[in-house]
Amino acid sequence: MLNFTYSSLINASVETVWTFHERSDILQILTPPWQPVEVVRREGGLDVGSISEFTIYLGILPVKWLARHIECNRYKLFVDIQAEGPMQHWTHRHEFREEDGKTRLTDAIAYEMPLAPVSELLAGWFVEERLRDMFRYRHEVTQRECENRREYR
């Protein structure tokens, strides 16, 4: 099992950052333009039982990814798991914590690649780099949107 964490401090209230994540188009907004991902559907927002379905492309191969929300504590965290997709295991915690009037946003992922541990030894570094690129983008977008837009306040 591998673990990945990305955290940043956003100069906006927890309520503002949470509300931004409730947007119906949040998946499109937070998907980096270089990632070959198509959002198929999103049902239920951030609540327990909500689902998001994507098609990700591994080269030319389309792969279904179905995420299901299993925990939600408003203004604190929500957790989704991969219910169907390319990973052997995937749990993603989205944590929101007030820190000196700002929001500490932390994404923590526990995952296992197929054919682990061999695949993790050979390609774990590559997945880690892609995750870092993706979450850097997501946090930059979240920071820009929440710090500069009044509509989320």
Image: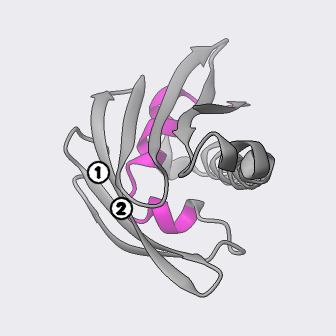
Q: Which residue is mark 2?
A: 24
- Circle 1 residues within 10 Å: few <14, some 14–19, many ≥20: some
Which labelled disc corresponds to residue 45? 1
Whether label 1 touches label 2, CB < 8 Å: yes
Which residue corresponds to the image point at 55% horizontal and 28% vertical from the top-left? 13
Marker disc for residue 13:
none
Left/right placement of residue 48 relative to residue 97 reads: left
Q: Amino acid at mark 2?
A: Ser
Q: Is residue 24 magenta?
A: yes
* Dominant secondary structure, magenta: helix
Most distant residue in the bottom direction? 60
Span of residues in magenta? 11-29
Say above or below: 1 vs 61. Answer: above
Measuring from the top left, give residue 39's x and y in whole percent.
Answer: 43, 73
Whole-number angstrom distance, CA of label 1 to CA of label 2: 7 Å
- Residue 106, above or below 140: above
Residue placed most toward the observer, 47 or 142: 47
